[in-house]
Amino acid sequence: FINHLTELQSITADETGISIGAGVSYSQAFDVLRDEIPSLGRLIDRIGGQQVRNMGTIGGNIANGSPIGDTPPPLIALGAELTLRSHSGRRTIPLEDYFLAYGKQDRLPTEFVEKVFVPRPAEGSHFAVYKISKRRDEDISALCGAFHLVLDADGKVANIRIAFGGMAATPKRAKHVEDALLGEVWSWATVSGVRDAFAEDYQPLTDWRATADYRSLTAKNLLTRFFLETAGAPAELRRFELEEA
Ligand SMILES: Cc1cc2nc3c(=O)[nH]c(=O)nc-3n(C[C@H](O)[C@H](O)[C@H](O)COP(=O)(O)OP(=O)(O)OC[C@H]3O[C@@H](n4cnc5c(N)ncnc54)[C@H](O)[C@@H]3O)c2cc1C
């Protein structure tokens, strides 16, 4: 229990990004992130309940290494870097490299998580994170998906990072889906055409929160949701909605 270490409790923002000390509580992080990265702020506000948000820390959520911790997917999608510290110094690694396998993280016996640095999303880029759970509060995610998209001047995908929790033994990027989207026009034809690539990235489990089929379908649908939120509903989908109505 390290909540008394005030040196780990600072959160600072500048033009490059936001540096979050490992001991910063969810409530403290929410106060800053709701303005800096609103979608991430909204997610933090849905972790546990108010008591957990006041006591639980961003560092604990990461260090814990849970495949269903809510902060790693959005932080990985944003390209966050993790700083680990020990008596012999510090090292900084991409957050996604910290999660090696179920229950196994890249942390040496004497190391602790000191801070996480979240680069500020580029001007004009799109970022969103979606938590799927049965209740607003006090409910662990069945899955949690985060999307970070940069388009070029021609409306093509210049960069995309997609990361999910609840879909694998660790928080994990959807590299096959990302590769299928890279360089393509950000259109409904492109997005609907890459949905099946999720099966190459994730073979989720069935547990009491959700079935494997539910998780697989929802991951695809979250990509659709992200597309609709960034590009607006294309004609085919609007027609579908009208027919369904
Ligand atoms: C009722 C309840 C509801 C919850 N709901 C959610 C939810 O909706 N979403 C979600 O993501 N999580 C949820 N959690 C988990 C919670 O958010 C925290 O991630 C978890 O409890 C860790 O809390 P903590 O920060 O106090 O860390 P601790 O419990 O103190 O630590 C967790 C582990 O990480 C280690 N650790 C902590 N900090 C560091 C560090 N800086 N460096 C190295 N090791 C460290 C500790 O030694 C320990 O092994 C919930 C927990 C509870 C009890």
Image (cartoon, helix red, strand yellow):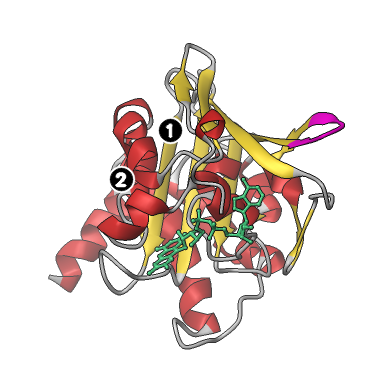
Residue furthest left as drawn: 245
Q: Nearer the viewer, residue 95 or 168?
A: 95
Disc 2 secondary structure class: helix
Q: Amino acid at mark 1?
A: His
| Left or right of 157 in this view: 54 | left
Q: Is residue 62 magenta?
A: no
**Image location (x, y in percent) of residue 85:** 75, 35
Decide if residue 170 is on the left or right side of residue 126: right
Q: Residue at x 56, y 47 (%)?
A: 2
Front in this rendered view, residue 204 or 158:
204
- Mark 2 CB within 8 Å of ligand 1: no
Q: Which span is picked out in magenta? A: 85-90
The label on residue 168 is: none
- Local crowd size for mark 1, using a 10 Å CA cut-off: few (<14), some (14–19), many (≥20): some
Left or right of residue 114: residue 228: left
Residue shown at 51% from the left, 21% from the top? 17
Residue 184 drawn at (x, y percent): 60, 38
Q: Earlier in the sequence, mark 2 or mark 1?
A: 2
Q: Give the label on residue 42, or none.
A: 2
> Is any atom of residue 214 visible in this view?
yes
What is the quadrant of the C terminus in the image?
A: bottom left
Q: Residue at x 28, y 47 (%)?
A: 233
Q: Is residue 57 left or right of residue 88?
A: left
Name the residue tied to disc 1: 126
Question: How many marks do you count on the picture?
Answer: 2
Q: In the figure, 72 relative to 142: above or below?
A: above
Q: Nearer the viewer, mark 2 or mark 1?
A: 2
- Residue at the farthest top position: 15
C-alpha span from label 2 to label 1: 15 Å
